[in-house]
Amino acid sequence: MLGLVEFNIAFFMQIANTLILFIALKHLLFKPVTEFMDKRTQGIESAIEEAELKNKESDRLKAEYEEKMKEIKKERNQIVAEATRKAEFRSEEILTAADQEAKNILEKARVEIAREKQKMMNELKGEISTLALLAAGKVIEKDLNPQMHQQMIQQFIDKAGEQKWQN
């Protein structure tokens, strides 16, 4: 006996059993657990890589989106500016047309007033001449026939038309 451990067959059997148990556990338990852990590690690493790729892709898409939004805002501003310019131009056209229409209406009104004035003057001349002839007929106390009456009216109108009528 050399101490606490005796080197006999039981000692060597325990060492052999421990080695067999270690080898069996290594193949049956450690190897599958190690493979499982390696697969799990690889899965996590691939998930992280995939997440990084997706983050990069989302950053790229976000940048594209922001660029498109800038372009859309720029285009919107151009459209609004163009619409404003067209509206101002159209407004000027409408105001010019309305101004011209008002001038045309005033001119037509002036022409109509002048025409009505001339018509009234002619009617007034006719009435004055009729009154004058009636008064003259009374003065000379003779009865005029219609032909003579018409001739005298025409002469009076011709003479009255040569002079200016005042309002």
Image (cartoon, helix red, strand yellow):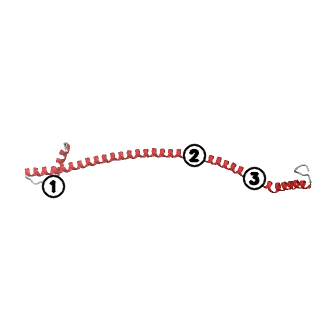
Visible in this render: residue 29?
yes
Residue, disc 1: 146
Does label 2 or label 1 sit earlier along the sequence? 2
**Could you tell me how far apart the alpha carbons at marks 3 and 1 are, in whole angstroms?**
139 Å
Give the residue type at disc 2.
Glu
Query: Looking at the figure, which quarter contains the C terminus?
Result: top left
Residue, disc 2: 66
Residue, disc 3: 37
Residue drawn at (53%, 45%) of the image = 73
- How packed is label 2: few (under 14 Cα within 10 Å), some, or many (20 or more)? few
Kindly state the secondary structure of the residue where label 1 is placed. helix
- How packed is label 3: few (under 14 Cα within 10 Å), some, or many (20 or more)? few
Does label 3 or label 1 sit earlier along the sequence? 3
Dot in front, 2 or 1: 2
Between 164 and 50, which is closer to the camera in this rendering? Answer: 50
Give the residue type at disc 3.
Met
- How packed is label 1: few (under 14 Cα within 10 Å), some, or many (20 or more)? few
